[in-house]
Image: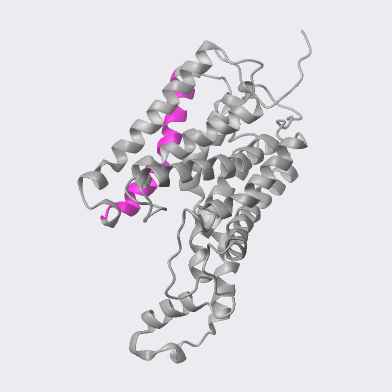
Amino acid sequence: MTHQTRTTPTTHPRMSGHDLRSIGVFTALAFALAWLVALPLWLGDGLTSPLFPLVSVAMMTTPAIAALVVVFLMDKPRQKAWTLGLWPLKPARRLIGYAALGIFGSIALVLAALPIGALLGVYPADFTNFSAFQQVLDEQAGTAGPGEIPIPTGALIALQLAVLPLAAFINLIPALGEELGWRGWLLPKLMPLGTLPALLAMGVIWGLWHAPLILLGYNYADAPGWLGLTAMVVMCILVGALFGWLRLRSGSVWPAALAHAAFNGAGGSYLLFARAGEHVDTTQATILGWSGWILPLALVAVLIATGQFSPAKHPAGPQPKPE
């Protein structure tokens, strides 16, 4: 019996023709299902449709469905859960550490984009009076007025921020629907291309997959479709690289899924700190716009320069092999 070095089970020394076919089928299936799920919005009232919440959650399951189809019907590895990054849940300390980093790191990225955008003059911030949020409170209070709200606005803001980590667990299942496909299966499959090409390909695929909603105005309501989709792709390349780092270093999909869930949960926080009566252009401000990409770009550059994208080694356990 020859000795084999144990590496991340989904990493291969080279990309075979079978791998390319699997990637092609996965991508085509994920995209086709996403468009199929979003079709009622295109045939109906778009983002204003009452079906939108259901459609958006259902669309998040399509990468997982595509990955499961490829794993069970094409690749057929012996350790399917391992191939998808669902298992093993050890070493526990490493897994918990990267999960916590994913949750709090994602929230920090979303929030840090706001002062950066304010400094660059593209985010209309009000970090002292929270006037946009106060305006929303006033409207909700109706004739009672702001004086009837028992909790100060600043305390409400603090409470909103304090519960953001909880959103990682509330949003985990929908986020796992994406991450099982993107970072769980696809990213390790792309790694034989090299770290940078794999991250770029992963980000482009992930970004373009959002097209059924982005072209309807989701995330970039005031931008033409081509600009919104381009911005989404760039954001997905940068943020996806950080989620990918969590996947590769932890050897598990769970930290990336929690990071994605926390990221989604924190996405609307820019409304808390905006100035009343001012328009927020998401192609320029927030984590969705160019000013919000500065920090993740710097982090990705540091991680690449220091070789931090090398996959984790599992201390024990069988490696999944094609049947």
- Give the x, y percent position of residue 25: 42, 22
The stretch in magenta equals 49-73
* Residue lying at 68% horizontally and 27% vertically, measured from the top left: 8
The structure's colour scheme is one colour
* Residue 303 vertical position relative to residue 194 in the rendered view, above or below: below
* Residue lying at 53% horizontally and 81% vertically, measured from the top left: 153
Viewer-proximal residue, 161 or 43?
Answer: 43
Identify the main secondary structure in magenta.
helix
- Give the x, y percent position of residue 126: 55, 74
* Residue 304 vertical position relative to residue 214 in the rendered view, above or below: above
- Give the x, y percent position of residue 28: 39, 26
Viewer-proximal residue, 51 or 269?
Answer: 269
Q: Hey, which quadrant is residue 3 in on the image?
A: top right
Q: For the N terminus, which image quadrant?
A: top right
* Residue 14 vertical position relative to residue 65 in the rendered view, above or below: above
Viewer-proximal residue, 29 or 131?
Answer: 131
- Give the x, y percent position of residue 230: 45, 42
Answer yes or no: is residue 84 visible.
Answer: no
Using residue 180 as the reference point, say whether residue 217 is left or right of it.
left
Q: For the C terminus, which image quadrant?
A: top right
The residue at the far left in this view is 43
Q: Hey, which quadrant is residue 141 in on the image?
A: bottom left
Answer yes or no: is residue 161 visible.
Answer: yes
Asked if the stretch drawn in magenta spans residue 66, the answer is: yes
